[in-house]
Image (spheres, rainbow, N blue to C red):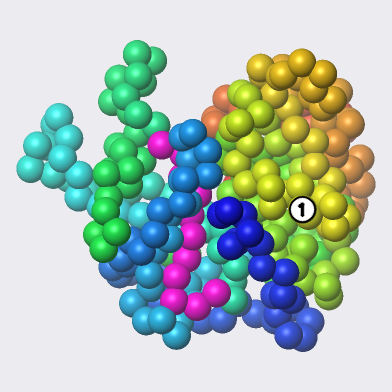
Amino acid sequence: MWALRLLRKRPIVNGKFSSVPAGPLIDPSHYFEVKLSEVMPISHDTKIYRFELPSEDQPLGLPLGQHITLRAKISTAQSPEGEYVERKYTPTSRIDEYGFFDIPIKIYNKADNYPEGGLMTQFLDSMQVGDKLEVSGPKGRMKYLGGGLFAIEKEDKVVEKSARHIGFIAAGSGITPCYQLIQYVAFNDQEDLNMSLLYANKTEEDIILRPILDDFVADQKLRAYYVLENAPENWQMGVGYVSEDHIKEAMPPPSEETLICHCGSKAFNQMVRGHLHKLGYSEDMLFKF
């Protein structure tokens, strides 16, 4: 099973709060080629794509809290000869993996309410093992420095935020930046953070990475609360859209040592932000990936 391959429970670092090892990600404007080496289906519409790095003895070098850009030349209606398409993604492989990185990606095919579908996800779905595309990074407004310390870009300055109670609110594939941090803390015994996850999806089958998330829950590394629009009979967690009651049930309360990170569609983020403000969370307690 794919989860058993990815859930490797060795300590993630030796020593306390080690820095991310350097890799080929040197600048957001610098692109390099990676080769698709494996595709692992994990749900009816989501797959984990594993890409080989230029050298098998190098890590990706992505700072915690940041993401990468994938770029490919794709034929479109406007440019049948092909145009460069870029999309941002967050790898979920461990920072101490060498020679490859993994990205879970939800495939958006053409549909009545989405006539073009997802250009990049359809391209990825068409790739064969051995095909290549380009990667750049790192990008993002947050870096996790370890020990509950976050460096967050706000307008023209970087603000440090210290927190012991970390909440993640995600929808669909918005779980990936949350999982990147959850995994690091869960595998690092030197980290002493209380982590909570509120994860919204349409159906139970849509819960990406659930076997690993549930394993973190069983190990008491994480509290997880799932919200489903279409819940099965006798579902014991949240139903419908994310509400203030769901947040009160799943998230740490407002405090100077609380940080709530959320990720999803623009509409989802706006809705969640509104709920959080009404519940008394101030802006310095919130971050949108």
Quadrant position of residue 243: top right
Q: Read off the magenta span.
A: 97-107
The amino acid type found where label 1 is placed reads Asp
Picture coordinates of residue 214, whole percent (x, y): 76, 47
Q: Is residue 103 magenta?
A: yes
Q: Residue furthest left?
A: 81
- Pick whichever, 131 or 241, lies toward us: 131
Residue nearest the observer in this picture, 144 or 219: 219
Give the percent coordinates (x, y) of residue 53. 38, 73
Q: Is residue 284 above or below residue 80?
A: below
The location of residue 153, given as percent across then percent down, is 62, 57
The image quadrant that residue 204 belongs to is top right
Residue drawn at x 60%, y 41% is 208
Q: Is residue 218 visible?
A: yes
What is the x, y in percent for residue 105? 46, 45
Q: Secondary structure at mark 1?
A: helix
